[in-house]
Image (spheres, helix red, strand yellow):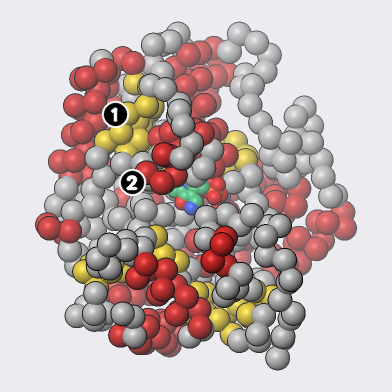
Amino acid sequence: MNRVATPNDFSSFWMPFTANRDFAKDPRLITAANGMYYTSHDGRQVMDATAGLWCVNAGHNDPLIVEAVQRQIATLDYAPHFNFATPQAFELAAQLANLFPTGLDHVFFTNSGSESVDTALKIALHYHRVRGDVARTRLIGRERGYHGTGFGGISVGGIVNNRKHFGTMLTGVDHMRHTHDLARNAFSRGCPEHGAELADDLIRIAELHDPSTIAAVIVEPMAGSTGVLMPPVGYLKRLREICDRYGILLIFDEVITAYGRLGTASAAEYFNVKPDIITTAKGLTNGVIPMGAVIVDETIYKSAMEHATVPIELFHGYTYSAHPMAVAAALATLKSYRQNDMFARVATLSPLWEEAVHSLKGLPNVIDLRNLGLVAGIELSPRPGAPGARGAEAMKLAWEKGLMIRVTGDIIALSPPFIITEDEIHTLFGKLADILRNLA
Ligand code: PMP
């Protein structure tokens, strides 16, 4: 048993996206992890049904990654990447250029998804400006979109609670509607049939503002944090066509979908739609060291190289861009994905996963089930007058029963590490069914 004393003071650490006032009453503390499981402070094994926060794709404490990080810390702890670089940073960028669709060949390193989003938005604005298309300054996002917590990300994002408490956002931003439509699409398997026409919101917005004022549109190809919304069939292709028609850059925020979640290296590959910029983070390093990467189309990169009037083509970067520890973790993570053929494994598991997800149909309060790749959304009806209460209770009950799940309001999101076995999938959904039956 790995019992660890609980802290006396729960107030010093202001926890992210957490009910801080509530936490001390019932703390959920983690002390170790291995493979598919966490160890809780009271010595229990808890199955990680969410790969941490959608990041630990290869499972916890993958020996390949652990060794690479240990080796790196003993060799080179830090090196700046302004005017200097490590050879490994170029190696990683080249590998990423190979991994993403042809043409998306240039990589800017960040430390998180939020930084990747800010970077992508800035690169999009910069692209139009260096080409002399200076009126293109507007950015378009979507209702219910999640693009991290920087001011750029919350401006183009559309989750109301993440925006309303913080005053003025970036100006010149507009939002398309989201695609969540239970009336037409409840209990769809994979991508829902209805809703491709919602992409035409971009036409309406472009006509409203004049297309020549719009720089870029950013969408999650599969929206995660808002409660797992799959794109309607044909929706992303239609967005691409509209962007092409109007000269608008298309940014896919792939912070959760890149690196195998749908059974391919990227959602762009899965949906066969090529954006101009892809934002990534999370699975890039298996969550081990913070890192993000923005993958940029060659036309954008070349344009900066050709048109910039100053020696430094892009005045942007971070102290920790291409941090040696993160680069080492990322190289080892990509190796682990390759060696264990993990993206193909996701594709192989996903039909079984789909059956398991939809086996929850008919359980109390379940009003929708959604699945794609190794992702599930389980939407529960809200308790009258207490939206989110049922979801929060499900999360707590699951933890007690040895399962870590993630909830957004009353929607449960599942996204396990790719190493999950068929037996573990059955165990996971067996436990979840039990939890749902016990939920008032
Ligand atoms: N974009 C998307 C689509 C995300 O899902 C997330 C994180 N869940 C982010 C951006 C922000 O990433 P980070 O928390 O690493 O800043």
Q: In the image, residue 207 lies at what x, y percent?
A: 20, 20
Q: Is residue 254 above or below residue 175?
A: below
Residue in front for this viewpoint, 213 or 259: 213
Q: In the image, residue 169 lies at what x, y percent?
A: 45, 29
- Residue in the image at 77% along x and 27% along y: 83
**Which label is found at residue 126?**
none
Mark 2 lies on a secondary structure that is loop
Reading the image, the residue beneath label 1 is: 243
Of the image marks 2 and 1, the number of the one nearer the N terminus: 2
Question: Which residue lies most toward the bottom here?
Answer: 1
Residue in front for this viewpoint, 342 or 433: 433
Q: Amino acid at mark 2?
A: Arg
Nearer the viewer's eye, disc 2 or disc 1?
Answer: 2
Q: Is residue 159 above or below residue 362?
A: above
Reading the image, the residue beneath label 2 is: 144
Q: Are marks 2 and 1 in contact (CB under 8 Å)?
A: no
Residue in front for this viewpoint, 439 or 220: 439
User: Quarter of the image containing the N terminus?
Assistant: bottom right
Q: In the image, residue 204 lies at what x, y percent?
A: 19, 26
Gap between marks 2 and 1 measured at Cα: 21 Å
- Residue in the image at 59% along x and 46% along y: 112
Q: Amino acid at mark 1?
A: Cys
